[in-house]
Image (cartoon, rainbow, N blue to C red):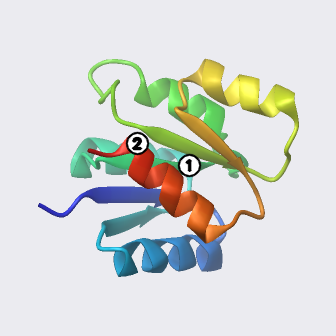
Amino acid sequence: MTLHILVVDDNEVKVMLVAKILEMEGFHASTACCGRDAIQSVIRLKPDLVILDVNMPDIDGYTVCRQLREPPIHATMPVIMLTATAEESDRRQALAAGANDMIPKPFDMDDLRTRVRALLP
C-alpha cells in the first residue's frame, strides 16, 4: 500500500518540488495551496501525513493544525510543520497546535525524508 502525504504551502514551486521528491521516494503526494484547501483536502483525501507550512495567506498553519486535531478530522494523523524561522517559540507553538514535528526553512530534503519515515508505519 502506497502511503499518501498532503503537502501544503502557498508557494507553488516549493509545494510541487516537495511533492515530486516524496513521489520519487515511493509516496503518493497531493498538494494544497492554502489553509482552507488543506482542511478540505484532509477531509476528502484522508492522507497518512500532512506537511504544513506555517505562513499562508488565508489561515496560518498553526490554526490549520489545531483544526485538523478537532473531531471529526483525523486527530492522530502525523503533521510536520515548516516555518521560515527557527525560533524555539515557533517550535513550541507548532507542538502546542498539535504538530508532531517542525522543520525550519530552508530544509534539507534528506532530513525531511527521515522525519517523514519516522512518523509513518
* CA distance for labels 2 and 1: 14 Å
For residue 81, side relative to residue 120 (left or right): right
Considering only vertical position in the picture, is 74 above or below 37? Answer: above
Q: Position of residue 38 (x, y in %)?
A: 45, 49
x 42%, y 30%: residue:
68
Percent x, y for residue 53? 63, 51
Viewer-proximal residue among 111 and 58: 111
Tell me the residue at 29%/49% (across/down).
47
- Would residue 79 be seen by someone viewing this image from the given angle? yes
Residue 39 is left or right of residue 96, and the answer is left
Q: Secondary structure at mark 1?
A: strand
Q: Which mark is residue 52?
A: 1
Residue 90 lies, with reference to residue 113, above or below; the image says above
Q: Residues within 10 Å of mark 1 (few under 14, many from 20)?
A: many
Residue placed most toward the observer, 94 or 62:
94
Farthest left residue? 1
Q: Callout 1, which amino acid? A: Leu
Horizontal and vertical percent for residue 76?
Answer: 33, 27
